[in-house]
Image (spheres, helix red, strand yellow):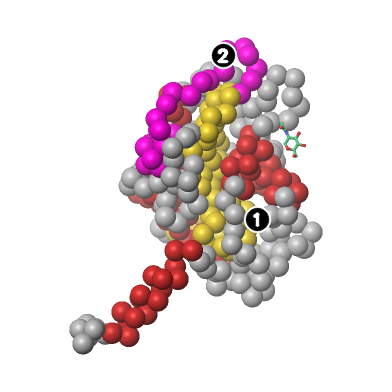
Amino acid sequence: MLLTTPTPHLLLGALALLAAAPLRAAPSAGCGQAPTLTGETAHTLTVHGQARRYFVKLPAGGGYDNTHAYKLIFTFHALGGSAAQVVAGTGGYLPWYGLPGLDAAAGEAAVYVAPDGVDRGWANAGGEDLAFVDALVAALEADLCIDDAHRYSTGFSYGAAMSYSIACARAKAFRAVAALSGGPISGCEGGGDPIAYYGQHGISDQMLPITMGRSMRDRFVKNNGCTAQSPQEPAKSSGTHIKTQYEGCDPAYPVTWVAFDGDHTPQPMDKGASNTFAANETWAFFSQFKQEQ
Ligand SMILES: *[C@@H]1O[C@H](CO)[C@@H](O)[C@H](O)[C@H]1NC(C)=O
């Protein structure tokens, strides 16, 4: 008798899942359905008794195909900001952090979500913001065709803090995060799992000092098995940025660090440049993870 368990069919089912699961991303329940979360208008979800607002962006030009499982990218605003600003590209942000133009050019258009914080921030009191993220993932994947192995998060300042909080608490549910000039002010529940991590910070940040960005990065340098180092950072008034790709990491979980000569800004630019490097570097980091389809 090979199987002594009272429910051998369940065990066989579980074994079949285990055999199939590690390499196969699951298309979400929204695949094949007509989407309702269309238009860049406000939607709400009630979480912890509060109506929480968010905006969704589907691939431009009617390009959404409900048989294609898309990457899902969270874009969080900073303290005092709003999702509407992230959508419109006002208040210092590029629209959706400048990513949609780059993803379309690469033929990898993604689905974006911009949520609103409580009191214009991401204090994550009692875990309410992580609960909002969980509820958003469920709502979006019920309605839209999403690749559940390719969820991402980015944001500036408090939005970086929230992305870091996701990296700490939801490393198994998200593929990668990009934290732009953040601090650990949304908390770090768990914090022991590896996840691909991009950190970017100004050497003269007056709001959230670069020491915070370095220590957030170093959590994932350790978790991801990378070789610890003190990356070179640009000199003050050099007008440059320096990118370091950590070595020795588990290949599934890279860490990239960009230090720039500047203060607290979502759109740092090199001297003489007319565009930020932040969007390109974030997209370069996220787009290295290839979907199976
Ligand atoms: C970002 O990438 C775009 C598209 O490849 C390019 O045209 C632009 O010059 C880049 N911007 C910067 C600041 O590197």
232 in magenta:
yes
- Residue 51 placement, left or right of 98: left
Image location of residue 52, percent across then percent down: 51, 55
**Disc on the earlier residue, 2 or 1:** 1
Q: Quadrant of residue 97?
A: top right
Q: Quadrant of ligand 1?
A: top right
- Residue designated by label 1: 110
Q: Which mark is residue 235?
A: 2
Q: Amino acid at mark 2?
A: Ala
131 to 99, vertically: above or below: below
Q: Residue at x 77, y 63 (%)?
A: 62
Q: Residue at x 37, y 80 (%)?
A: 13
Q: Is residue 259 above or below residue 97?
A: above
Q: Quadrant of residue 4?
A: bottom left
- Magenta stretch secondary structure, dominant: loop
- Percent x, y for residue 216? 42, 34
Q: Secondary structure at mark 1?
A: loop
Magenta segment, which residues? Answer: 217-241
Q: Is residue 216 visible?
A: no
